[in-house]
Image (spheres, rainbow, N blue to C red):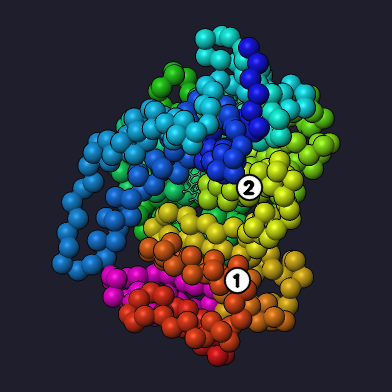
Amino acid sequence: MSDEFDVIVIGGGPAGENVAGRAVRGGLTAAVVEERLAGGECSYWACVPSKALLRPVELAAEASRVPGLTVGPIDAGKVLGRRDEAVSFYDDAGQVGWVDGLPATFVRGSGRLDGPRRVRVGTPDGGERVLIARHAVVVATGTSAAVPPVPGLREASPWTSHEVTAATAVPERLVVIGGGVVACEMAQAMHGLGARRTTLLVRGGGLLARMEPFAGELVAESFADSGIDVRLRTGPGRVERPAPGGPVTVHVPDGPPIEADELLVATGRRPATTAIGLDTVGLRPGESIEVDDSMRATGVEDGWLYAVGDANGRALLTHMGKYQARICGDVIVARAKGEPDDLPALRDLADGYGAPQVVFTDPQVCSVGRTEAAARAAGFTVRAVEYDLASVTGAYLLGDGYRGRAKAVVDEERRVLLGVTFVGPGVGELLHAATVAVTAEVPLERLWHAVPSFPTVSEVWLRLLETYGL
Ligand SMILES: Cc1cc2nc3c(=O)[nH]c(=O)nc-3n(C[C@H](O)[C@H](O)[C@H](O)COP(=O)(O)OP(=O)(O)OC[C@H]3O[C@@H](n4cnc5c(N)ncnc54)[C@H](O)[C@@H]3O)c2cc1C
Ligand SMILES: NC(=O)c1ccc[n+]([C@@H]2O[C@H](COP(=O)([O-])OP(=O)(O)OC[C@H]3O[C@@H](n4cnc5c(N)ncnc54)[C@H](O)[C@@H]3O)[C@@H](O)[C@H]2O)c1
């Protein structure tokens, strides 16, 4: 059976679904091919469950800083139950209904390119369906967890982001390999929900290495306070798990072996592009698909192939994947109709500025644009200013022992912001103001007139500008 659509999207995660949404809005027909659950990693094994697990831990930490409030132990069973609700009990009927309602055609199965504009779908019943795209095929297959080649690691069946976000019980002793976002968020979630001993093995010299250095330092301080053992410049040399499901032993080069009940690997992602037929269109399987700012694959002739979200490797974040998807869907519509396709709204500018991101640890870490180091490396004439968030009245009022820091990176030639980082409890909600300032390239002299309310944490904006000299 062969079906024709204007647009075929392989991968029904947040990015893929949004391409279909925009294409249909523009008057095209679309099919979304999804091999697991509509909604993708984000909805079931990443953003949504991880934040459902972190929320009570964050709230308990917040409440414990306010004299007069007593926080009882967290009921992990109830938290896991709420996580199950948040992931719709791993049932995608609602998301499939959303695709149907666009209206677009939802095809359950594994999609694979088979030459230009042709997609073969292996369906769950063992059958096959061939789909033909009149205008475009969009790859939105995301990523999967990378597992480093440590002796015994794979055989030990470690947890990845999938298993930890779907945990049905909290392990007593957990070892986490990695010091990035998944490692920090999930170590804190499991520890806060009752893990007695949580150990992070970090290859580098700090946590959250892509952010400003003080971000990882403040998170490490908070981890130390809550009893999480962060070990830097180390890693697993060998792993043993003699009995499936039994204790696991992690051998480290600089100390005695660590025994744990679970081992979480959080060492980054690999593009899910290995088995999608990229070789049939001249691209290398297993790599990110390089795209231009309209999300069109640069390595394919005739411009019919696009890639959005994690699969193109630009920014591994849901909101950025959805942003790229809106651009991609709209540009496909414009090209299909022969309309101008080079309007500013049809190009990805945000990834170039530096994607906004919130890390939902306690303290939260959030940033947009470039770090000071990245701005200098890019050749800007930079001046950076920092401010201790605890000295802002609004932050002090939130609780005792508030710790946090803010930094603004200024392009001295244009006197606009290149990057902003905030670290502190609850600062994630401050980020969008920074995103607007960086993206709109608001001159500092103009920003001076954006008056933050007293007594909010946002007064840090005023303090940063004063520190700069305004
Ligand atoms: C633990 C964790 C927490 C995270 N938290 C956040 C957060 O708080 N905020 C944030 O912005 N980002 C977060 N991320 C990142 C975020 O999950 C990803 O950036 C986002 O899911 C990418 O969306 P996507 O649509 O590109 O891919 P995905 O969500 O990975 O979806 C891809 C879909 O394609 C399907 N697929 C793959 N191959 C095929 C095929 N051959 N045929 C058919 N279907 C296929 C998959 O089954 C999947 O459903 C987190 C990631 C992890 C691991
Ligand atoms: N709140 C959020 O926005 C959020 C939450 C979770 C994940 N994410 C996204 O998901 C992506 C993946 O997160 P992640 O934490 O898996 O990746 P990451 O790139 O953030 O961190 C990977 C960590 O693993 C380490 N590492 C890499 N290879 C290693 C090896 N062979 N041995 C030991 N350590 C090794 C790195 O040094 C780093 O500390 C991130 O890019 C992030 O954007 C976002």
**Which picture quadrant has residue 460?**
bottom left
| Residue that protrudes farthest toward the bottom in the picture | 470
Q: Is residue 33 visible?
A: yes
Kindly identify which numbered label has been placed on residue 440: 1
- Please identify the quadrant where the N terminus is shown: top right
Query: Which residue is at 77% across, 27% downward?
Result: 116
Q: Is residue 319 magenta?
A: no
* Callout 2 secondary element: helix
Foreground mark, 1 or 2, reads: 2
Taking the image in four quarters, ligand 1 sits in the one at: top right
- How many numbered discs sit on the rendered protein? 2
- Please identify the quadrant where the C terminus is shown: bottom right
Residue 343 to residue 287: above or below: below
| Dot 1 amino acid type | Ala
Which stretch is magenta?
A: 386-407
355 lies left or right of 359 = right
| Dot 2 amino acid type | Asp
Mark 1 vs mark 2, CA separation in Å = 22 Å
Residue situated in front as seen by the camera: 100 or 56 = 100
Badge 1 crowding class, 10 Å Cα cut-off, few under 14, some 14 to 19, many 20 or more, is few
54 lies left or right of 153 = left
Q: Which residue is mark 2?
A: 330
* Callout 1 secondary element: loop
